[in-house]
Amino acid sequence: MYLNTIQAAYGSRKKAKRVGRGIGSTDGKTCGRGHKGQKARAGGFHKVGFEGGQMPLQRRLPKVGFTSRTKKYSAEVRLSEINSLNVDLVDIEVLVDNNLVPVFAKKVKVVNTGVISRPLTLKGVGVTAGAKLTIEAAGGKVEA
């Protein structure tokens, strides 16, 4: 097989419609565009979604979804990351100082990923139910 011998499958390529070729061609005179009106004229189309001046569908329907304003100020920390710290009392300031959460974090939550091998005290930090059980099993405690 050579590139110059490749042909499209039969019926996959339709012949172009030849309009304006007389009354017997079924597409003579008005060329299948009907009589008068915007769609009959050259360049007579408009932007997508235009409904002739009627309020378009995409503007009639309400907006959906939103971007949380508080997402930027909250962060998550894994148990394995906390276990690597060399402190006994963990709060937001300690996490910021050790680059585990961004400086502008206001809310931090500890998730149960990894293991904890020593007792730790968490203060002012949110904790998932599974993480709380793991911390308490290691001899630590969670303070509000």
Image (tube, rainbow, N blue to C red):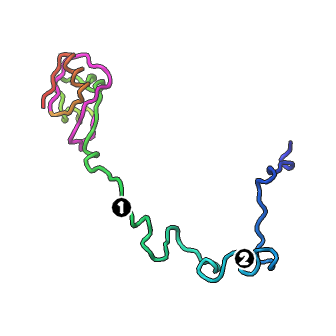
Chief SS of the magenta region: loop
Q: Residue furthest bottom?
A: 36
Q: Considering depth in this image, is 7 or 40 the residue closer to the camera?
A: 40
Res 63 → quadrant: bottom left
Relative to 142, does residue 59 appear above or below in the rendering?
below
Q: Which of the 4 image quadrants contains residue 115?
A: top left
Q: Is residue 119 magenta?
A: yes
Q: Is residue 51 above or below residue 62?
A: below
Say which label, 1 or 2, has the lower sequence index: 2
Query: Judging from the image, what secondary structure is the residue with disc 1 in?
Result: loop
75 with respect to 24 (left or right): left
Q: Which residue is mark 1?
A: 62
Camera-side residue: 89 or 4?
4
Q: Amino acid at mark 2?
A: Cys
Disc 2 secondary structure class: loop
Query: Observer-nearest residue: 56 or 124?
Result: 56
Residue occupying the point 24% across, 29% down: 128
Single out the residue that lies furthest toward the left: 144
In the image, which disc is placed on residue 31?
A: 2
Going by the image, does 15 lie left or right of 100?
A: right
Q: Mark 1 belongs to which amino acid?
A: Pro
| Quadrant of res 64 | bottom left
**Numbered circles on residues, count:** 2
The residue stretch that appears in magenta:
100-123
Q: Position of residue 30 (x, y in %)?
A: 71, 80
